[in-house]
Structures are given as structure tokens and as C-alpha cells.
Amino acid sequence: MRELSPDEQIKKENAELRQENAELRKKIEELQEKSQHDFLTGLYNRDFFQQQAGKKVDQINKPFSDERRERGALKDVAVIFIDVDNFKWINDEFGHEAGDRVLREVAEALKSSVRGDKDVAARIGGEEFAVLMSDTTEEMARKKAEDLLKQISRRTTMQMGSNLSDPFISVEASMGVAEFKKGENLSDFISRSDKAMYIAKESGKNQVVAFSEIPEQESAEND
């Protein structure tokens, strides 16, 4: 085998280094991707959701220096908060495997319903989920939430076991919707959608409540 010249040796080593760097970058990207997702459902996780919501809030609150930039600016952002109804009962009655199955099906309903380029669907923790929607008013988000309610019910109508005598259940959810108000902070924005979800839960479950629909007195009592 012919011995490589010094120039050829350098080229070979450079090529090997480029290959190693490419493989390292790929591994880093894979790790970053995993760190952004919930392991059970494949949705984005709470940290990534908070990061993206923070960016949207900053974009809207940031002052613009000229009309051209303002025309292309993000103006409306809304959040849907989702809590699976009676989830503890499902876990207690049918086991954690059944509970995990429900969470995965809820996640699939979200994946099939959201816009990949404008929305961020995430599992916030436990049986709570959220959808961050860009260029979306509260009214538009409410309609999407109503659709999600139907999608979740369809996807989670399932038999809890392998025997013909095992019961069927259809999972329901409570949802709260809020639109970002320019000038408020991220915490207040998220808190309003969470309050709306709480009201939906307290007033009968399996429904959507928009923050603007909550009477001022009732909203203040839940602060």
C-alpha cells in the first residue's frame, strides 16, 4: 500500500475531523430535540412551551422603530390550557398503563389538530396540556378548543382491557382559553388561561371557558 504524502495525510485527517464534527453535531441536535420533548407523549415539554411563549410575549411587547417592521409583526397570541377530567379515577380504577394510554391518545388528538408552523402543543405535567397559538384571537382559540374537545372524545373512546366484558370509557377534558394582552407579562398571560380552565373544571367539566367570559367578580375570587 502506497504511503501517503504529507499533503494527502493532512487532507485525510481533515476529512476525518469533518466527519467526526458532523456526527457530533448530529448527536447534539438529537439530545437537544429529546430535551425539548415529553418522553411519554412525544409532545413538547413544559420548559420548551414556556420558552416559546416567552418569545411570543417579547415579540408583541417589543416596540417597533418603523412601519414596515410593524406590518409583519406578530399581533395576536392565545393559549388553550387542557386538563383531562377524572384522570385520577382512571388511574385508580384501571391502572397506570391505562392512564398512560389516555395521555398518549390526548397527545395524538393535539398533534392532529394543531398547525405545525404556528402552534406549540405541549404536555405541561401530569394530565395537563397546553397549546400556544400564534396569529390567533381568543375567539379563534375558543373554536379550536371546541374542536379539540370533540377530537379527544373520539380518540379516547376505548375499552379498558382485553376482555369483551371490560368497560368502555370516553375521556373528557376541561379547557381554558385566553388571549395575550399587550403590555402584560408571561406569568399573567398563562395565569388567565389557567383560571379559565379552573372555572371550566369547577362548573361541570367537559367544556371550554374563555377568560373574557368569566364575570369580573368570579375572576377576582380565583386570584
Image (cartoon, rainbow, N blue to C red):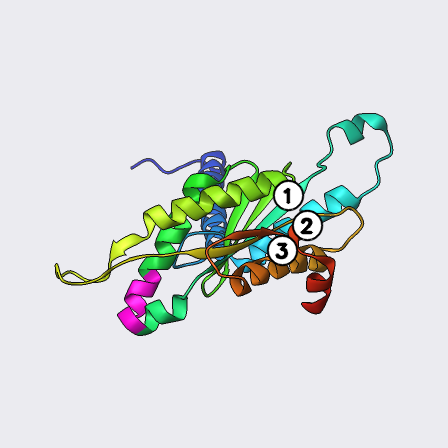
Q: Is residue 23 visible?
A: no
Query: Along the horizontal axis of the image, is 42 left or right of 143?
Result: left
Q: Which quadrant would the N terminus be assigned to in this image?
A: top left
Q: Which mark is residue 115?
A: none
Q: Which quadrant would the C terminus be assigned to in this image?
A: bottom right
Mark 2: secondary structure: helix
Q: Which mark is residue 212?
A: 2
Determine if the magenta segment contains residue 54: no
**Label 1, on which residue?**
138
Q: Can you give x and y, in whole percent of width and height, for residue 35 in the image?
A: 50, 57
Question: How far apart are labels 3 and 1 at the CA level?
Answer: 10 Å
Q: Can you give x and y, in whole percent of width and height, for residue 163 in the image?
A: 13, 61
Determine if the magenta segment contains residue 94: yes
**Mark 3 / mark 1, whichever is N-terminal:** 1
Indicate whether 216 appears above or below 151.
below
Front position in the image: 37 or 17 = 37
Q: How many marks?
A: 3
Mark 1: secondary structure: helix
Question: Which residue type carries mark 3?
Answer: Ser
**Label 3, on which residue?**
193
Are circles 1 and 2 on residues that touch, CB within 8 Å? yes
Question: Which residue type carries mark 1?
Answer: Glu
Q: Which residues are magenta?
A: 93-100
Question: Which residue type carries mark 2?
Answer: Ser
